[in-house]
Image: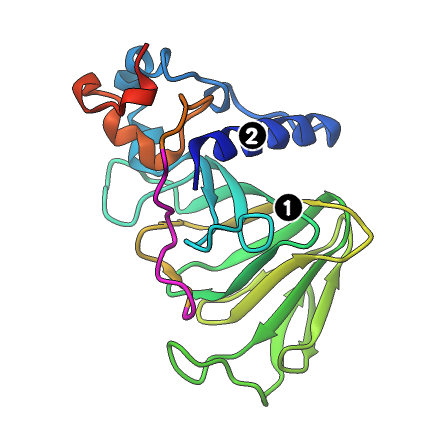
Amino acid sequence: MKRSDINKTILQAIEFCREMRFLLPAFAYWTLDEWPDKIGMAEEIVDNQMGWDITDFGTGDFDRTGLLIFVLRNGNFTDQRYKKPYCEKILIQNEDQILPTHFHWRKMEDIINRGGGNLMVSLNNAVSDTEPDHKSPVAVTMDGERRSFGAGEPVRIRPGQSITLEPRQFHKFWAEPGTGRVLLGEVSTVADERVDNNFPEYDLRLPDVEEDERPVHLLFHDYQMVRDRASWPPAWRR
């Protein structure tokens, strides 16, 4: 993905959050020039992959296949300094954009429609790590109510509604056409984007970034470069 497209997407997300009256924390707005002074006090943000996360799964077509995430708070699978057993995110799903079929090895999550359009979710049990079950019904909980849906049956999540997804349950998201983009909340057990995602059709969860301009705000996997200015790409320097 081009950094210029990532910047544009983040600015659009900030504006959409304002429209939805969802307030982001201060670190959502830290600039590249602010980060070197902040990072010493922001170890929890860095170590727990908090902040902006944008991916097109290596397709080169974010408008069709992709997702924007902002991680508000998170724990850690391996670092005992961080005691939180939970994670909270927002996600923005655009119309005509699909979050591809995947499951999580460990994470259990509630996906909440916070506003905007309707979210559509397709569900399948797993035959194996790479193969969804296209026959058996899928049992889920929606706002405390136990429900069952046919394999691959589209499930509509309207604003205010939520669905609970368990580990190893394949799921795919998209915004219902004609209803507008969706602001989603996610409340889950600890999330680790590097090791806990299984996308059978896509190998690249975190995209390669073409640095054609300075970042407006950093992605969580940019943090590793903040401490060493010598490693900054030329486009980051003034």
Residue occupying the point 37% across, 17% down: 32
The image's mark for residue 8 is: 2
Q: In this view, does 140 lie above or below 183?
A: below
Question: Is residue 163 in sight in this rendering?
Answer: no
Q: Do the residues labelled 2 and 1 touch (CB within 8 Å)?
A: no
Q: What element carries label 1?
A: strand
Tell me which numbered mark, 2 or 1, is placed earlier along the sequence.
2
**187 displayed left or right of 51:** right
User: Residue 236 or 227: which is nearer the viewer?
Assistant: 236
Q: Is mark 2 on a helix, strand or loop?
A: helix
Residue occupying the point 62% across, 84% down: 137
In the rendered structure, which amino acid carries the disc numbered 2?
Lys
The image's mark for residue 184 is: 1
In the rendered structure, which amino acid carries the disc numbered 1?
Leu
Which quarter of the image is occupied by the C terminus?
top left
**134 displayed left or right of 193:** right
Would you identify the image quadrant in which residue 198 lies?
A: bottom left
Q: Is residue 206 magenta?
A: yes
- Write the start and end of the magenta stretch as one range: 200-210
Q: In this view, does 96 lie above or below 43?
A: below
Q: In this view, does 25 lie above or below 181?
A: above
- How far across and down, in percent of the image, does residue 216 sit? 47, 21
Q: How many C-alpha atoms fall within 10 Å of the one at disc 2: few (<14), some, or many (≥20)?
A: few
The image's mark for residue 6 is: none
- How far across and down, in percent of the image, does residue 90 sit? 57, 41
Would you identify the image quadrant in which residue 221 lies?
A: top left
